[in-house]
Image: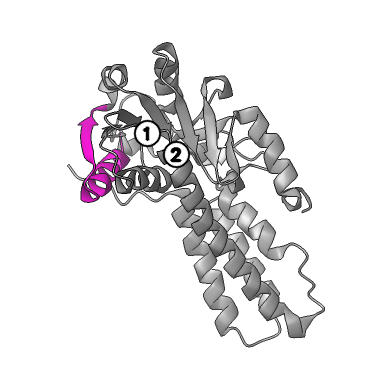
Amino acid sequence: MKPKGQAVGAEEIARSSILVLKEVIANHRKDDLLEILLLHQRNFLKVRPTQPLLKNSMRYLFFNVKPEEKNLLKSHLQLKIETILNHYGQSQQAIAKAAADKIKKGSIIFTHAYSSTIINALTEAKNQGKDFTVYNTETRPSYEGRLTSQRLAKEGIKVVHFVDAAARLALKKSDVYMIGADTITKDAKIANKVGSEMFAEIADRLHIPIYACADSWKYDVAGDFNFEDDLARRPKEEIWPAAPVKINNFAFELVNPELVTSIITEIGGFKPAILVEEVKRKYPWFFNL
């Protein structure tokens, strides 16, 4: 069985959305550019309402924009677009290098679901000449873990693929548990694919360090994330079509920050509660809109 569609990480979603806006800005010739961009923003966030990286990118794009300066508006927005795209690239590089430092030669890295940030980090470790093995889950019901396995194998990284229910057996042999994150909440929890906290609890019991790797722009300023909300559930048909019972098909869950050794971001690696304060200090404009 193949993965049900292509897994797409939060970074890829944000980047593709910003590239759309870049094209709109370049090609728009009328005076209603800002209105058109705001319309695109509403449409993006309607489709992806639980993506703080995208939301914060939009915050930056429209922060301090002065609609009355029509002759400067286009160039100002184009400069901001390039700054956002540069942030994505530089952030990924910084996180990859910092995360690769946590990987020792001969070690086993456990990961769950799909994260382009984790793939970049593991690829960086491989490029540094480190020999290691990745244990990953298939991540039912959409099998995002298969895409992770395929991409890592393409980079020449050794991968052992486990059914989700065998994750404890995989963790018992692992040296590090490393995951991505879709969201960093106000109370320093990370939101990731369902199963992430369960595996973190097992790793903690086994005294395995747990690293979450994420762009700090994933901080949820608005506090929108609620894993019990319908937005964080997948269709029941993915699990059991025409089931005679109720199906709970959660997509995400929150990981207790006390379980996390460090959240590795482009501004450094911190305990979760400290990271939240660092984000507030580094990016005050998050809170100005």
The type of residue carrying mark 1 is Ile
Horizontal and vertical percent for residue 224? 64, 40
Q: Residue at x 24, y 42 (%)?
A: 157
Q: Which quadrant of the structure image shows residue 169?
A: top left
Q: Is residue 275 shown to the viewer in this render?
A: yes
Residue 23 versus residue 269: which sits nearer the camera? 269
The type of residue carrying mark 2 is Ala
Query: SS of the residue at dot 1?
Result: loop
Colour style of the rendered protein structure = one colour
Query: Is residue 148 positioned above or below 208 on the image?
Result: below
Give the label on residue 103, or none: 1
Horizontal arrangement in the rendering, residue 67 relative to residue 207 (left or right): right
Horizontal arrangement in the rendering, residue 148 relative to residue 183 (left or right): left
Q: Residue at x 32, y 20 (%)?
A: 171
Residue 57 versus residue 102: which sits nearer the camera? 102
Q: Is residue 3 shown to the viewer in this render?
A: no
User: What segment is highlighted magenta in the picture?
Assistant: 140-163
Query: Is residue 194 positioned above or below 266 on the image?
Result: above
Farthest-out residue, top: 205
Q: Residue at x 27, y 19 (%)?
A: 173
Residue under label 2, please give it: 99
Horizontal and vertical percent for residue 48? 53, 52
